[in-house]
Amino acid sequence: MGRIKVEVVYALAAEADAVTLSLPAGSTAAEAVAASGLPQLGKIGIFGKVVDPGTRLSDGDRVEIYRPLALDPKEARRRRAKKAR
């Protein structure tokens, strides 16, 4: 089996950490995150779409590590609406 090249990205508030990896073909998103050394705090996605950690990767994929939300978006809207009254 060959190898694939993927990028693992973890975005912070002001910057992003990115690691480019060469992995065995058939590797999963979870394996890429583990190999990157970046923290896995939340969900995992590929090119902006949340995926199961067991999803097999393709050459050129960008694996994204999503941070947990600080506040539920619906609750944030409620608070802004209440404040605007």
Image: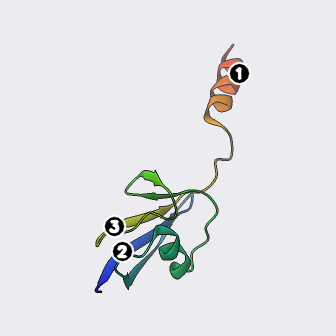
The amino acid at mark 2 is Val
Give the secondary structure at mark 3.
Answer: loop
Give the secondary structure at mark 2.
Answer: strand
Q: Residues within 10 Å of mark 1 (few under 14, many from 20)?
A: few
Q: Residue tagged by mark 2?
A: 6
Residue that sits furthest to the top in the current view:
85
Q: Position of residue 47 (x, y in %)?
A: 37, 57
Q: Residue tagged by mark 1?
A: 83
The amino acid at mark 1 is Lys
Image side of residue 80 versus residue 64, left or right: right
The amino acid at mark 3 is Asp
Mark closest to the chain's N terminus, 2 or 3: 2
* Marks 2,1: beta carbons within 8 A: no
* Marks 2,3: beta carbons within 8 A: yes
Q: Nearer the viewer, mark 2 or mark 1?
A: 2
Image side of residue 14 versus residue 26, left or right: right
Q: Residue at x 64, y 52 (%)?
A: 68
Give the secondary structure at mark 1.
Answer: helix
Label 2 vs label 1: CA separation?
Answer: 44 Å
Mark closest to the chain's N terminus, 1 or 3: 3
Q: Residue at x 39, y 73 (%)?
A: 7
In the picture, which quadrant includes the C terminus? Answer: top right
The answer to which quarter of the image holds residue 66 is bottom right
Q: Residue at x 68, y 30 (%)?
A: 75
Q: Nearer the viewer, mark 1 or mark 3?
A: 3
Q: Residues within 10 Å of mark 2 (few under 14, many from 20)?
A: many
Q: Position of residue 84 (x, y in %)?
A: 66, 18
57 vs 46, nearest the viewer: 57
Q: Residue tagged by mark 3?
A: 61
